[in-house]
Image (cartoon, grey):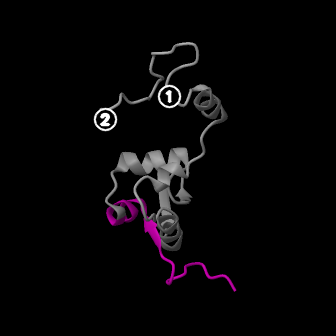
Amino acid sequence: MVTMHDLADPILSDREYRAWLNLSAPTAQRQRSDGSGPPFIQLSERRIGYRQSAVERWLESRTINRVGALASAKHVPDSATRFIATVNADHTEPGHANTPALGARAEGGGS
């Protein structure tokens, strides 16, 4: 049996969601626009809600155990893969023996 309002899984307002995660309104809006945030509910034309369980699952999916793990799990476009494959192991562009490839670091340097 489905109930109209599950007290064990409350629906958070946009403001409650943002306060819980300490997010700005523009960040929450961007997440909704690009799909990078948790699933949300369109309660009315101008009102957004979030099931607490959905936010908790989203947070769990973003829990990592090392720096950069989330970024490395993102899909690399095929065009980027082809570009990376054309760069020689010595970080020079093909046909340019002493020209560093884009993104290659100079030896001894780093940021």
Quadrant of the frame with the C terminus? top left
Classify 34 as above or below 49: above
Q: Per the image, is 3 magenta?
A: yes
Which residue appears at 51% of the width and 49% of the height? 72
Residue 109 occupies which quadrant of the picture?
top left
Residue wearing tag 2 = 110
- Choose between 36 and 105: the one closer to the eye: 105
* Coordinates of residue 81 in the picture (x, y in percent): 62, 34
Which residue appears at 44% of the width and 68% of the height? 12
- Choose between 67 and 92: the one closer to the eye: 92
Q: Amino acid at mark 2?
A: Gly
Quadrant of the frame with the N terminus? bottom right
Which residue appears at 62% of the width and 82% of the height? 3
Q: Per the image, is 94 magenta?
A: no
Residue wearing tag 1 = 90
Q: Secondary structure at mark 2?
A: loop
Which residue appears at 38% of the width and 45% of the height? 26
Q: Which residues are magenta?
A: 1-20
Q: Amino acid at mark 1?
A: Asp
Say whether marks 1 and 2 touch (CB < 8 Å). Answer: no
